[in-house]
C-alpha cells in the first residue's frame, strides 16, 4: 500500500512541479553555475547505497589551497532560500519514484556514518529513507543526534498510512514556518561522530 501511494503521489508531483523544476534549474544555473544537481551516495533500505539527487544550493568556491570553503562561505542568499523553502529537495521525488526512497521515513544520511551506528541506530535502515519523517517534523536539525535517532526508530516501530499522512501534512506547515532548518551555529547539522555506547 505504501509503495503504491509513493508511486502515485510521485508521478502527480513530478507532473505538477515540472514547470517549477525547470525554472529553478535556470535560476541555479544563473546563480551558482553548473552542475545544477547535487548527487551523492546515501544508504537506503537495509543500508543499500543509492544516488540521492537534489538541487545544488552551494557554490564550488575554493580557498587559496584549493580546498572547498566552509558551508557558510559557499551558501549565498539564493542557496539559503532554496534550503529554507525545501525546494532543493524537489528532485528527490525521482528517488521516490525509482523506489530508492519513500515520501515518509528517516532522512538518508551520509554513507560514511554507516560504520558509526550502533545496533539500535542502524534500525533506521529497516525502512526506506524519506523526503520527510518523524524527526523532521519534531526538531529537524535543531535536535541532537540521539534525539533524532530515537524519533527515527519510533517511526520504524509505529509506521502506518495514517501516520504518514499526518507527517506529510505537518511537513507542509513546517516548510512555510521554516522551523528547524539549521542547528545552532551551523548551516545544517553537525557531523555525526558515533555513539558512546552500544544501545540495544
Image (tube, grey):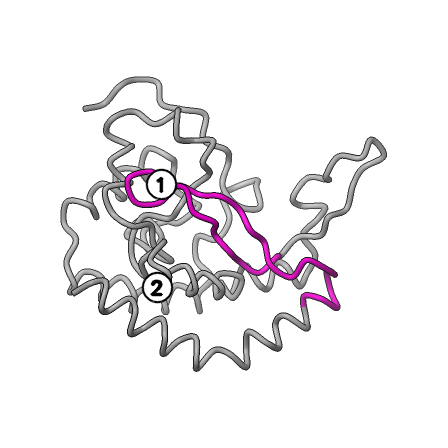
Q: Position of residue 130 (x, y in %)?
A: 34, 54
Q: Secondary structure at mark 2?
A: helix
Report the residue at 43% width, 80% height from top. Answer: 15
Query: For the residue carrying disc 1, how many other residues have a C-alpha within 10 Å: few (<14), some (14-19), or many (20+)?
Result: few
Res. 170 image quadrant: bottom left
Specify the quadrant that holds the C terminus: top left
In the figure, 10 relative to 101: above or below? below
Q: Position of residue 62 (x, y in %)?
A: 78, 41
Report the residue at 67% width, 45% height from top. Answer: 72
What label does residue 200 carry, if any? Answer: none
Foreground mark, 1 or 2? 1
Specify the quadrant that holds the N terminus: bottom left
Q: Position of residue 121 (x, y in %)?
A: 28, 32
Q: Position of residue 77 (x, y in %)?
A: 68, 61
Report the residue at 22% width, 68% height from top. Answer: 4
Report the residue at 44% width, 82% height from top. Answer: 16
What label does residue 171 carry, if any? Answer: 2
Q: Is 78 or 17 nearer to us in this picture?
A: 17
Would you say residue 138 sits in the magenta stretch?
A: no
Magenta region, residue range: 28-56
What label does residue 48 carry, if any? Answer: 1
In the figure, 177 relative to 75: above or below? below
Whichever of callouts 1 and 2 sits on the residue coming sooner in the sequence is: 1
Query: For the residue carrying disc 2, how many other residues have a C-alpha within 10 Å: few (<14), some (14-19), or many (20+)?
Result: many
In the figure, 10 relative to 42: above or below? below
Question: Farthest top residue?
Answer: 197
Q: Secondary structure at mark 1?
A: loop
Would you say residue 48 sits in the magenta stretch?
A: yes
Amino acid at each position: 500500500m505504501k509503495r503504491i501511494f509513493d508511486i502515485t503521489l510521485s508521478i502527480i508531483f513530478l507532473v505538477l512541479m515540472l514547470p517549477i523544476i525547470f525554472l529553478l534549474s535556470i535560476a541555479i544555473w544563473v546563480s551558482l553555475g553548473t552542475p545544477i544537481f547535487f548527487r551523492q551516495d546515501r544508504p537506503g533500505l537495509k543500508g543499500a547505497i543509492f544516488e540521492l539527487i537534489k538541487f545544488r544550493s552551494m557554490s564550488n568556491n575554493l580557498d587559496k589551497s584549493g580546498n572547498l570553503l566552509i558551508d557558510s562561505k559557499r551558501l549565498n542568499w539564493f542557496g539559503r532560500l532554496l534550503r529554507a523553502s525545501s525546494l532543493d529537495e524537489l528532485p528527490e521525488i525521482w528517488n521516490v519514484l525509482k523506489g530508492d526512497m519513500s515520501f515518509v521515513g528517516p532522512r538518508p544520511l551520509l554513507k560514511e556514518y554507516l560504520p558509526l551506528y550502533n545496533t539500535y541506530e542502524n534500525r533506521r535502515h529497516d525502512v526506506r529513507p524519506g523526503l520527510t519523517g518523524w524527526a523532521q517534523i519534531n526538531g529537524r536539525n535543531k535536535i541532537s543526534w540521539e534525539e533524532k535517532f530515537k524519533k527515527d526508530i519510533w517511526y520504524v516501530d509505529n509506521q502506518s498510512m495514517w501516520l504518514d499522512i499526518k507527517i506529510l501534512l505537518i511537513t507542509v506547515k513546517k516548510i512555510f514556518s521554516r522551523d528547524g532548518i539549521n542547528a545552532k551555529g551551523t548551516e545544517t547539522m553537525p557531523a555525526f561522530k558515533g555513539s558512546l555506547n552500544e544501545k540495544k
